[in-house]
Amino acid sequence: MIAPRREFLKGAGVLIVGLSSNFLAFAQEGQFGTHRSHVDPDKLDSWIAINSDGTVTAFTGKCDLGQGIFTAQSQLIAEELCVPLQAVRLVQCDTDVTPDQGSTSGSQSTPTNFNVQDLALAAATAREALIGMAALQFGEDERTLTAIDGAVRSPGGRQITYASLIGTKKFSLPVNKEAKRRSPKEWTILGKPVRALDHAALMTGGFEFVQNVRVPGMLHGRVVRPPAMGATLLSADKASITGIPGVVAVVVREDFVGIVAETQFAAVQAARRLVCRWNPGPALPPQDRFFDHMQQQPSHDELSVDSGDVADGLQRAHHVLHARYTYPYQMHGSLGSSCAVADVKSDHAVVWSPTQSVYPTRNCIAMLLNMPPDRVRVIFVRGSGCYGLNGADAVSFDAAVLSQAVGRPVRLQYTRQDEMMWENFGNACVIEHRVGLDADGSIVAWDRENWVANRGSRPGYDKPGNVISGMLLGYDPEPLKPTPAKAPTRKLRNGSNTVPEYVVGCAGGVCSGSGTVKSERVLTHTVASPFYTGPLRSPLRIQNTFANECFMDELAYMAGADPVEYRLRHLHDERVRGVLQTVAKAANWQARSVHRKSASGHEEVTGRGVACVAYEGDNGYAALIADLAVNLRTGVVRPIKFTIAIDCGPISNPDGLRNQVEGGLLQGMSRSLVEEVTWDAERVTSVDWEGYTSLRLDYNVPAIETIFVVPDDVSATGAGETSITVAPAAIGNAIFDATGVRLRHVPFTPARLLAAIHRRFEATSV
């Protein structure tokens, strides 16, 4: 149970947050389009409080979903304030007390809070303010004083603690944008490997997940979803569940149907037996022709770069290569299904939610409840694992609606089928390349088009229809407006890695790409998806990098060039080159111009492949070499070793970073080899662990060697999504090296690999 705000603040022994004169003025004005809230990010008291016992309470709008930033942010506060790590109490993502920092997403938490503003700057401001207070008390020049272990000391040995200087009082200061940050050379707490602060609680079962939240008087809910995509409700026969003890209410609103009961068992029984009549939805496009279907749909088009001379460049080229890559829908496949608890009264509401976006979720819940946003409080509580947008937002909406209907707290946890059929899947994509080579095999023109299936995505502040719950309650998802592309006029922001690393990336008169190819065109067609889509770890970056880096391997092969040398030939960005050269050296890469031929008579053959990325253009750099074996009889791919070099700037917690890198590689391996959403004419069919496969717990994990590359004088970047981004391409390239077979569709299942090997054998036998 989590205490309400007033009790929380009282119990913490702190005076808190800055109330802005622009209270709840909901204009977009913050980072990532955040709205101004009652917690003013310009005020120091919104971020930091010194308690009477010398501990520090810090407030952050970036929450730990399992990626380890609770520990890294605690290290940051301790470092900048010069207090022991154990003295920091971090409060994360609670709309009553923490600043609005948008969604915790996109590998942006570290850049947001570590670089030039927000949490780090607030802590540095607090340190300088405390030193200034001590200087007044000592009557000494503050430039001679130092902050150590929660106290200020003078050269003569005088000392005063932070608690004595300000404990329980407010700073009443603005965040000083000129406050001096501690440099990596001064770090004593940052940069050190620290085991996750929640490690013991997680290992001993003491950690409170949202599934464990209990509220006095709490009831249990279930939702009854439509039987097929696009189906609409005709009727719900409440009499069909008469006789089930403990049922409190059947809630019907628009196409939303839910059950509330005294016990979870009663809710489950009622949800299963409730008779509903539905209008069928439109037929789904056949899965085996879906990518052709995508390319025939009306689209919203956008040019990322266009030098205007690609057609001429291709015409003049010595060779022109064309390839089409496809990437399926994939899902989170969270081990536990999404859960939320809501307590909605007539004039206010509290929702305990695993959402990554507490403020936007608060606004959307307020819309659904027809309640002012400032009467709704959303408290983040970690769920069962989310890498973007699983059912976390949708289940929070549902729980709030059910609680409002019965006037009591409701806990709602989805079934496996609720989660897997209706979560927002990672986008399906088609990517086509046309590239011209000169007589020496170097790239002279690159033309690229991709088609992205899209529907919904994050609800943001005012689009609850972007997830299934909002749509069933009568809100449409963000509409897709077919529009022809216009010439790019603004500087390239390669946020989805749509633009290959190897082009110069010129737009709006500024060239910000990392490559050397000047003749370039990158066109994106966004088309309507039959399923909800949204961010899934490395959203669109993994799809695009798979196609870019596998095709780069094809180009190197056509040019008779070594894949590493060929990449370096077309790269000028030193940080991409740096990780690529580092990983090649660490893996003892042997230059080659052709794939290694399979040893005849052997059932299993080996290969190695390489891939690299400048994640989002400038938010982290990675290069991966994958060594693997392919069983020619079964088609099973067995990864042997991954060697990866990562550059994310200064490293806050090497232990946490290693966890992120290795975890990302293993998830990338799973998505490369086995994960794919399936459907029939009406509905998603991959709704359990038989239908949707991820790597089993008994899978043989390959060896992983991780090398950190840390340039001087650079800012921190994200790191949570760089390693997964290069996994499918490196694995695909290694399969080609081992077998001579190029797979242009993920996942690389045994059936697909065997079929490709047989086709190659038949072609060479003719």
Image (cartoon, rainbow, N blue to C red):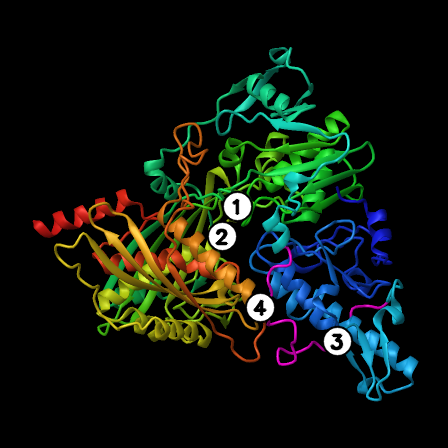
Residue occupied by mark 2:
539
Q: What is the three-letter code of the residue carrying label 1?
A: Gly
Q: Are marks 1 and 2 in contact (CB under 8 Å)?
A: yes
Q: Residue 445 vs residue 344: left or right? A: left
Which mark is in front, 4 or 2?
A: 4
Q: Residues within 10 Å of mark 4 (few under 14, many from 20)?
A: some
C-alpha separation, residue under disc 1 versus residue under disc 2:
8 Å
Q: As displayed, is residue 289 above or below residue 609?
A: above
Instruction: Please report whichever mark, 1 or 2, sits nearer to the chain's N-terminal start.
Output: 1
Residue ID for mark 1: 534
Instruction: State the residue in front, 9 or 192.
Output: 192
Q: SS class of the residue under badge 3? A: loop
Asked whether residue 488 appears in the rendered view, the answer is: no
Q: Amino acid at mark 4?
A: Pro
Residue depicted at 72% across the width and 53% down the height:
35
In the image, the segment drawn in magenta is 173-198
Q: Earlier in the sequence, mark 1 or mark 3?
A: 3
Residue under pointer 3: 179
**CA gap, disc 2 and disc 3:** 35 Å
Vertical comparison of 92 with 330: above or below: below
Could you tell which of marks 2 and 3 lies nearer the N-terminus?
3
In the image, residue 187 lies in the stretch drawn in magenta:
yes
**Residue 42 vertical position relative to residue 208 in the rendered view, above or below:** below
Would you say the residues marked 4 and 2 are in contact, meaning their CB atoms lie under 8 Å apart? no
Which class describes the residues within 10 Å of circle 2: few (<14), some (14-19), or many (20+)? many
N-terminal-most mark, 4 or 3: 3
**Badge 4 or badge 1: first in the primary sequence:** 4
Given this view, does label 4 or label 3 mark the residue nearer the observer?
A: 4
Q: Which label belongs to residue 193?
A: 4
Where's residue 31, x and y in %?
67, 60
Q: Residues within 10 Å of mark 3 (few under 14, many from 20)?
A: some
